[in-house]
Amino acid sequence: MKQETEMTAHTLPDTMTAVTQSHYGEADVLAPEQIELPSPGPDQVLIRVEAAALNPADVFLMRGRPALVRLSMGLTRPKVGVRGSDVAGTVVAVGHKVTHWRTGDRVFGEAASGSLAHFATAAQDRIARIPNGVTAADAAASVMAALAARDGLTAGGLGEGVDGAGKRVLIVGASGGIGSFAVQIAKAAGAHVTAVCSGRNADAVRALGADAVVDYTQEAVTDLPAWFDLVFDNVGADPMASLLRLTTPTGVVLPNSGLDGPDGGALARVVKAYTRHLLLRRRYRAFYSAPSTAKLQAIGQLLSEGTIAPLVDSVMPLERGSEAMARVASKHARGKVIVTP
């Protein structure tokens, strides 16, 4: 394996183009730059990037807000200067401890060195093979968002192998990355899905399989009937207590938003959900989602069989990485923003 890494390295460039930032701020702090090619660690692979996808989490890291992210990212400037984490491409080098990946493998998963670049490193246990027939763009767009949708629905009682027939699911933020995948996964499980989004996105969300669509600009979510078995809230604009009143006697509320709202920010919302569940026996749930080879394989299977497909807002070249991030930061992106080198 070590010999393979060294032989491959002879064919690789010394530098690459990447979208970098030297300090925290808005999208205008990002710019394409020539930087040194990253080297994979002992248990990492080096991927030639074919597609990257952006998430609201990338915006938080770009801004360095909430301040808590700086404890791991860097107090005054980001330790990792290349933004983006979702990646898909071809393995071109492997670390000497890598046991199950070879050069030439097409993979998708989480980039360690940042995915808005021509090359990116990734831990060997945070990638999976791209199934035949699945494009790199679709694979990259499904890493964080599809995993969060799947993990969230599982935490809410609609996991793999669960028959959702007869269950009613309310998905708030249905036109976003996570919400659009959640609509498809919940529908595939047999649930009746009510999706909340703006009117301009209603047709796109219906096309994903939603049984009913609520335009939040015309109708208050909290005015809906109290008949939902699961409320999956990806926006955080309404208090959790108000959403709980929309559930059946056994229904649960699953908060999942990094934005500030009536229950505070992302961390405060999770803490409240946990404490109210444990101490007050309220029907709130919280979950943590992180990639693994097994989880990504499951997402790949869903993509391969056509159960899910990313709702794509736009595809931009790497040179427009700052514009791509600004689109995500605007909160108006319908589905995923994809960047290709």
Image: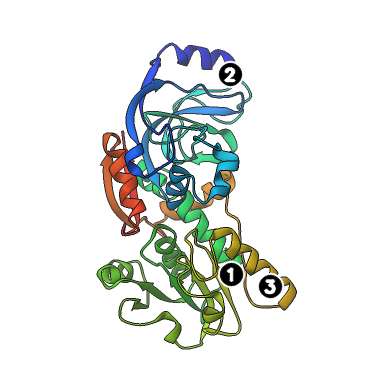
Residue 251 position, x and y percent, is 59, 80
User: Which quadrant holds the C terminus?
Assistant: top left
Look at the picture and state if 6 lies above or below 122.
Answer: above
Q: How is the image coloured?
A: rainbow
Q: Amino acid at mark 3?
A: His
**Of the numbered discs in the image, which one, if any, rests on residue 1?**
2
Residue 297 position, x and y percent, is 52, 47
Front residue of this view, candidates 233 and 131: 233
In the rendered structure, the answer to whether residue 191 lies left or right of residue 314 reads right
How many numbered marks appear? 3
Q: Residue at x 31, y 39 (%)?
A: 321
The first of marks 1 and 3 along the sequence is: 1
Quarter of the image holding residue 196? bottom left
Kindly indicate whether the residue at mark 3 contacts the one at mark 1 (C-beta within 8 angstroms). Answer: no
Q: Which residue is mark 1?
A: 156
Q: Amino acid at mark 2?
A: Met
Q: Which residue is mark 3?
A: 277
User: Which quadrant holds the N terminus?
Assistant: top right
